[in-house]
Structures are given as C-alpha cells and as structure tokens.
Image: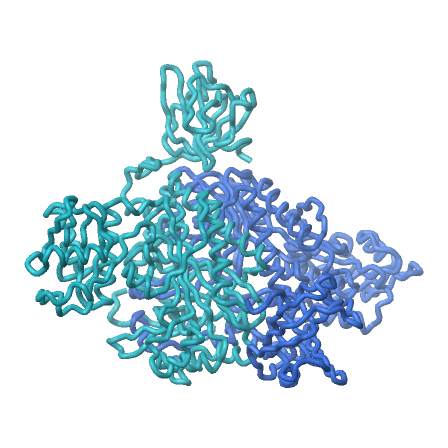
Chain colours: A cyan, B blue
Amino acid sequence: MYRTHTCGELRLEDAGKSVCLSGWVQKVRKLGAMTFVDLRDRYGITQLVVGENAPEEVKNSVAKLGREFVIQAKGTVIERASKNNKILTGDIEIDVNEVNVLSESEVPPFTIEDQTDGGDEIRMKYRYLDLRRPCVRKNLELRHRMAQLVRNYLSERNFIEVETPVLIKSTPEGARDFVVPSRMNRGQFYALPQSPQTFKQLLMVSGFDRYFQIVKCFRDEDLRADRQPEFTQIDCEMSFVEQEDVQEIFEGMIRHLFKEIRGVDIPKLEKMTWIDAMEQYGCDKPDLRFGMKIVELTDVAKGKNFAVFDSADYIGAICAPKCAGYTRKQLDELTEFVKRSQIGAKGLVYVKYNEDGTMKSSVDKFYTEADLKVWAERCQAEPGDLLLILVGPKFKTLPQLCELRLEMGNRLGLRDKNVFKPLWVVDFPLLEWDEETQRFYAMHHPFTAPKTEDIPLMDTDPGKVRANAYDMVINGVEVGGGSIRIHDSALQAKMFDCLGFTPEAAQAQFGFLIGAFKYGAPPHGGLAFGFDRLASMFAGLDSIRDVIAFPKNNSGRDVMIDSPSEIAQEQLDELGIELRKDIEK
Amino acid sequence: MYRTHTCGELRLEDAGKSVCLSGWVQKVRKLGAMTFVDLRDRYGITQLVVGENAPEEVKNSVAKLGREFVIQAKGTVIERASKNNKILTGDIEIDVNEVNVLSESEVPPFTIEDQTDGGDEIRMKYRYLDLRRPCVRKNLELRHRMAQLVRNYLSERNFIEVETPVLIKSTPEGARDFVVPSRMNRGQFYALPQSPQTFKQLLMVSGFDRYFQIVKCFRDEDLRADRQPEFTQIDCEMSFVEQEDVQEIFEGMIRHLFKEIRGVDIPKLEKMTWIDAMEQYGCDKPDLRFGMKIVELTDVAKGKNFAVFDSADYIGAICAPKCAGYTRKQLDELTEFVKRSQIGAKGLVYVKYNEDGTMKSSVDKFYTEADLKVWAERCQAEPGDLLLILVGPKFKTLPQLCELRLEMGNRLGLRDKNVFKPLWVVDFPLLEWDEETQRFYAMHHPFTAPKTEDIPLMDTDPGKVRANAYDMVINGVEVGGGSIRIHDSALQAKMFDCLGFTPEAAQAQFGFLIGAFKYGAPPHGGLAFGFDRLASMFAGLDSIRDVIAFPKNNSGRDVMIDSPSEIAQEQLDELGIELRKDIEK
C-alpha cells in the first residue's frame, strides 16, 4: 500500500502519528521559507507543510511539483496553527520528511475544481480529468449509493436479480434496435434490448415470482432532449399482483430512497387519472410543486361574438397569482413564448384582475367586465392575479397550456429543486391512434393489459380502452412506468390484432412469449424506472449526462475514445457484411 | 394480491386461519372421495385437500385441473392426518372451499421436476419451463445471493460501482469483438467490450480509488468448452496498491462468500509461482484437492540405452497411490486416454511398485529393479503405488501429465465437489512467444506491469520478464485474475513496442489511455472474476450454462427466441450496410 491513511481521515487526535499519504497535488503555496501543498484524493484534502528545517531533498522535490502531480508524502501529523474549518482535516497538517513523485502531470487543459474554466466539449474529451472534479465524482458516488439501496431494498423483499441476455432478437416494431452481426451465423443479427420486457415476463411464467435488475438498455434514436443511446433501468416484475401491489412496493422504494439520500419523508403518493392530468396540467407528467391548474372556459367564454373563441374547440386558462401588474413587455414575452414553433400557439389572451377589482384584458372589445369576472371566478382568481388564456383543438391546446404553466412556475420561482412531489398517473389509454399510418399503436407496449371492464371496448371502440398502466411522476418528470401485463394468449392475440399485426407476424416476433402463455402464466405486472433520470433528480441536476461516467454526445459519439469508428476490412469480411457503396470509407 | 400467503410459509401454528394461495398445480391425486392437489410456487409446495363435503363447484373445478395449471385456492389451514416431514409445510394442508383457475396449461413437453424426462435441447427451447424446476431456479437464487454479498462486501470497503459503457470502440488486437453499426454515423461501428479494462484504468486516473462492477462482457469466439458469447465479470480496480493489497481484499471476498454460501472457513491462500505450478501440476491452474504432484525424472532415467528416454527433453511422472494392482485393461485405458488427440502423448510408461516390494514396469527391458527403485524413491512412492510416466518436450509433456493427473484424481475419487482449495498463482511470464506469427503476445493484456526488477529484461530477453500478475485458482479452475498495471506512459510505450505495435498503431488504439497517463496516473491494479464460473462452482455444477437464465448454445444461438435472425432490408439500408453476395438471404 502506498499510504497508511487517505487524505480525508486524519484528525486532531492523530497528532503525533507518523503517516504516509498519497494523492494528487491540488495546489502549492509558498509562504516565506515554508511550502504548503494541498494533497487530494477521493476522500478529501490534507495539507502538507515543508518547513524551513525540512531535508534538502524534500525541499527540492516540492519545488518541482506542479498541479495534478501524483505524490507520496511521509511525515508527522501536527496541529495547524491556523485551522481551516471548511474541511474535516482542517485542524491538522503533515510535517513532511519524505516526498516521492509517483507520476508527473502536464498542465491539465482545465482546472480540476468544482468551478472549472473548461467548457463542455473539452471536459468530455478529457472526461477522465473532468471526473476528478469533486462535484462530478459525488454524482457517481450518489448513483452507486442509490443502486445499493435499491438492490438491498428489493432483495429484502424476496426479489431476485436475474441477468437477462444482451444479445437478443431484433423486433422491427417499436423504436430502433441496435443490431449486432453474428460471425458464426453469417447473414444473421442479434439485437441489443430496448428493455428486458419479454424476458422478465418469461421469468414470471417460470415462477420466479419477484424479479429485478439494474440493467443497460439500448435505443438507436435521435438524441435530442438529454437522451443516451445506452441507458440504465431499474427493471422489476412481480407475479400474482394487482396494480396496487406493484405501486405499494415501488412507492415504498422511492420513499426509502428519499429518506436515505435526501432525508425527506414523502407522504403516500396521490393517484391521478391520465385524463385529469391532461385536463388540469396539460400533460401526463404534472409538476405538482405548484398549483396554477388549467381551467376550462369553453362554456363561459363563447357566444360574445369573438370569432376566435366562438369557433374554438377548447378554451383554457391558467391563473398566475400576483401577476396582474405584468407590463406590456412581460406579456409580449409570454406571447412570444407560446408562439415558438416548439409550442405552436397562435396567440395569448390575458385578463388582468387588478388589485382594485377592475378587469383589463386583451379582449376588452368583446367582453364586459362582468363577463371577465365570470372567468376569474371560474379560475378562483383573486384581485392582483393574471389569467392567461389559450384556444384551439383541445388536445393541442392543453400541452401548450402545460408549457405556459411551467414557464410561469419558473418565472415565479415555484419549481424548487429541493422540493419533491411524486405521484402516480393511472388509467392511460391503451392505444394511440396515429393519423399518418392510420393505425393504433400501444401507448406503453403490446403486453400491457387493458382494464378488465374495458375489454369489450377492444372490439367496438379501441381508442376508449384504458390500460392497467401507471407512471410514477416526480416534479414533472416521468421517472418510472409500468403496467399489469396480459397473461392470457387469447387476450394477447386480440391485442396484437388491435395493433394491426397479422397472426403470422405476431408469431414470428413474439412466438416464444405467446407459446409460454400456453403453459400456465400467472397474473403479473411490474415497472421500470429510468435510473439515470432518477439519479440526476436526486443529485439535483438537469442532465442525465452528469450521472453517467462516460456519456455520449448528441450524435451518439464518445469523444474521449473517438467511437464509433471505422473497422478493418477483415472484420467486415469475417462478418459477411459490406458498407454500401455510397459511404465514403 | 392474489394470495395471502406463499406456498412455502404456512405451519402448524397457522391452523385455523383462512388463507388464499396461488401457484402451479404440481400434482393431483384422488383418494376415494378426496382429491389432493400439490400447489407449487417459488417458495414451496402446499397440499390442498378437497373433501367429500366440499362445494360442488370446487369439486368440478378440481376435477378439470391438469399439471401446471395456475390456480388460486381459498380455504382453511388444518393439521394433516399423515404429516410429510420432507417439506416445511408438511404438517398442514388447506381445506379448500374456493378454486379459481387463473391460467390453464397444455401438457408441458417435459416433467417439471428436478429429475426431468426432458433432454438438453427441448429444455433449452422451453427454457421458461426448465426454469420452473426447483433445482434450476435454486442456481439462479444462489447467483443472486452471491452478487448481493459481493456488492455489499465491496461497498463496505469503499468500492464504488460505476457503470462503464457497453457501446465502445473496436480493437483489432486481442480476441474477437462484436461490432454494432451506427445509424447516426453511417459506415462506423461501436464494439461491445470484452472487458471494461481501459475504462476502469481511466477511473483510477480520475481518482475513483476503488471501483467495482458486476458487468456483462462479450467475446465473439468459437464456443467450445463451456463458454458463452456474453458472460459476466466481477470487475475491480484499486489505486495506490501493490499486489498483496489487491490479493488481501479479494481473498477476503472469496472467503466471505465461502463462509456465507457454503458455511466453509477457508484458510489464508497459498501463493504458488507460475513455474512451480507448471512443474508440479503441469498447468497454471492446479487442482490442490489432491497431491500426486508431477516429479521430474529426466536426470535419473536417462543413460540406460532406452532411446525414447535418452533422446527426451523431459521425463516426468506422477505417483498414483494404491494403484499397483491396476490390470492390463486399466493401464490400456490410461494409455488410450493420454494418446487422445486432445492430449497428444505418444505413449505411457508405467512402473508398478508392488505391495511385496518388487517392481514391474513396461520398460523392464532397459531398467533394473534398482533403477526403478530410484525413480520410486524420487516420487516418494510406497509399496502398492503406481508410477505413470510421460516423455517429450517439457512444456508439451507437462500439460499431458496434468491431464493424466486429473484423470487419476477422478478415478480415485479425489476431486470432491464439496472440498475447496483456492490458491494464488503468481509470477506469470509477461509475454508469450507465438511461433506462427513470430511475435510476442501479452499473456494477460498489454496493460499488465512487469515486475520492477525484470524491467531491464524487456530490452534484452523479453520472454524472461515476469508479470506483476496473479490468478485465483480453485479446484483446478481459474476463477479470477488480475495484475498491477503500468501507470507510466514511457513504460506503456515500451510494452507496446515489445508487442510489435508501431507508436502510431498504439496511439490509434489506446491514445486516450496513453494520453490519460500524462496527467498524473496513480499506481493501480485490480482483477476480474468470472462470475458465471464462480457461481457454477459454488452451486457444485459443471457447466456455467446452469447459472445463466437464458444461455446460448454452442453455436451462439438462443434457441428459445430463435436468435440471431435475419433483419429487414430497411434496417440494413438505414445502417448503410449490405450482406455479402455469397450469403443466401
């Protein structure tokens, strides 16, 4: 061992001990004839002092030290004259009598400090240096701790972690698979799993009863919006359960994490139906840290000869508290915000409910103060509040109101990262109609069970069928989701039929699962959490990249190792594949 | 929840309780007017009884039950008249008053019992049914428990589990990579890692100090000898350590596993040099459950005009205790054994040291009884023992003697699966010369450090350099291996040079690691255990396949899901690749 202690563990009571530390040179300071070195490792920083009377060779060694040199220092623990109460080792320093340079360092391309001078690009290229920054390392330590807590929580509850295969079979359905050409079976390909869904269901058919896995999944899709081609799920499945049983276990797990990691007691989770979430928050992942719910005004705002409103499918408002004083400029900003192409509203109507009780709106021409008071009342607005109103087709306007609501939440400082409001969103539609391809798609996946009472609707009105599915949402982010699964081959066949699979296509894709259901499948269900997302939320970060040791960029590239890259012609030959002629090698 | 209790938990003290159980029908027996059903789940088997006075509909339901139906049964716990002390629930049964069939089952293709009538092929095709057999499930439960023990052991010792990427960069060096075409970077490929070696070393450069991961690795090689294209490693790395530090931690981990899983106290591990292992056991993974060490006879057996021996590079023997009475047939069998092409000896010489003190050998023509006594003495043979002797080039003959020794160990019942003899093999050669390509290869990998005192030999006699490497061997199986790594760019460059890399090729392949070493790399080292192998050893199994939920066969195929398989032309088009013309689609 190159050390007797780490750089984080010596205290005043160790004074007098002979010790040996190893680590990185954080800083070197000269003060007259004295030299101070901050020595850093994962566990902390300890101050080394080379005094006037130190051996000549020590003085010489220390004179040549630079930032990020790796050294070993031997000496005696002494009490510091001027203590540093910002660090736990701040009461002591090491009076050094031997220094060995273990590795020199070139000047790093950016400073190894929480507040670094390095931009995103250079930090990713030198990710191994970026990871030295304590703030980055702490995120990965947190992630480790969460994984351990999850595993122990579930193991204590009889869940078995089972590794499912990574080299599986490609399914043209769903999002995009990465494929892997097989050398031993030339012309054939494996696929990397987008999730272990079918395997965990097979484990339930096998009687494993309770399964979990913290597992890498893969999706070859365009990487906007903080996604990664490889990501990690906490994947779980249980047998002989109903929705509430699954929720109870995993709500408990999340509560346990909040308690252990953040010291927060989370009350029992609210359950909100999908339709309520849509109508009140404009989306299926409501941020409950603040109110400002969406209120429908369609019935009260029509019939006053304002053509835009009279012809509208839907009119909805949010009430921004204490914002009646918004200036023209502020209101213009909000109008610009909702008209951005990502949001796509045509315009914004406002109603100021002034402190003095008067009303002022952008549609005063069409509505009397009494009319506007009705709206305000519907919105439970008080004097001083501001109504913001959007119109259009209902399920286009609701998401716009959602964005506007979140924007107002930001402006009013209502989205505190240290406040956590988890909930379950339930009763999702089973199927989503796609106009372009003129067919239904599974909103979750083809194995999600419909609510028992809605099964007859599968034949008559598939779009109305509710799924026995549930998402866990925290602060506007979907952190996990799952469902009770179909465990009956006949119902599964009906589901494939709704999705436009021919029986042959269903058999080719999922034959093994349909087959398995013929030999006694238990009722089962489960869910999966996005572990990267969950960890970044617990770490108070905006991007999942910060909780991934070696993330890829928006083009799916690892700029540190320069991957993906070309491979040798011999490798292609062995695999029996060729690049298409139109690709420049 | 479809149950109040599992099928493994009810006891006599629960008598009188109203309960609800769910599970699979293991067996239905009729006894007069009574019907008994063995209901099975992961936790055990509970007997249901439908008596004469049971409701008619219950009698009707039970009459229709078949093997592997999934049912829910409600009733009262009662004491059994005739108890079954083979199962923990054997004191009670359930007097059933309601039965619900949750899933019917076709007759399974083999019996769901430890002693099944299903062959290997059909069990793999219906792996989800094979996994129902308690003996198979128990292996995976054991694997889970081991993974948990390992994670907790290492976490308690400040190791952080860090997920390293699965989509990395192909390295033409070393064994075969699986590659993954990138859709977003057409013409370029990711590779799947054969191990996280470079990433864990980067984490050490990053100051993570102690890293571990239980992680899937991938190797596209011919799958003889119980290998899988995807396999799992317990991968570890530590900073500021020497060989002994790494060994202490991981020896402790293995001892902990033996204690917890098998209830065995393992003493401190012996360390054996590679050359001792080769000379005494004929291989670098000696099985120490029995003696019968190899003894060299070259010096004492030459010079008696037996041309085969006189011209031999090496003559070696093992002494099989109490085997002097072996018949001609038995000796012929052993001769056939060593002459098999996998072993390749030319023949076998025996010397019987009879109980009466006389000697009898297959080379009596050339050697006197006194000559043979010298051999026997060298081998510490006693009257009644049998010497078995092979000759040839030393490092071809030693592995043959190794196989012969193991065979004799099997025949004599000396390889008890419930005895465990772990050891460290150390001081491996750094480099291996390959005659075919006329160059050196790294015996472990290119990042393994040479022993400090041997570094000068890298220039003068590279084949003589010993590595700072170590393998953990248990019962003749290499369960793990590792090394202290090079942490100095100059030494790493010298190593690449020994391996015949041009500086440009080294830079192209490992530029990021060489680069990282320029910014202060700590001394570091680590190791990796083959988790599949380790789990199969703890489970007392011969094949790693039995501790893998969904293994692939010897052609790398998953016969259950029928993978690998062809993919759609559109997928190939998107990826910018084509199958070679000579491959039939």
Residue A359 against residue B362 in the figure, above or below: above
Question: Is A289 displayed left or right of B368 in the figure?
Answer: left
Residue at point 14%, 47% (across, down): A330
Residue A547 against residue B228 in the figure, above or below: above
The quarter of the rendered structure image containing the N terminus of chain A is: top right
Residue furthest out toward the front: A370
Can residue B437 be seen in this snapshot? yes
Question: Is B286 displayed left or right of B455 in the figure?
Answer: right
Closer to us: A512 or A276: A276
Residue at point 44%, 44% (across, down): A262
The quarter of the rendered structure image containing the C terminus of chain A is: bottom left
Image location of residue B313, percent across then percent down: 67, 57
| Displayed quadrant of residue A570 | bottom left
Question: Is B17 displayed left or right of B216 in the figure?
Answer: right
| Displayed quadrant of residue B295 | bottom right
Residue furthest out toward the left: A365
Residue at point 52%, 48% (across, down): B236
Closer to us: B451 or A565: A565
Image location of residue A188, percent across then percent down: 42, 75
Closer to us: B350 or B320: B320
Closer to us: B557 or A223: A223
Can residue A512 be seen in this snapshot? no
Image location of residue B91, percent across then percent down: 76, 67
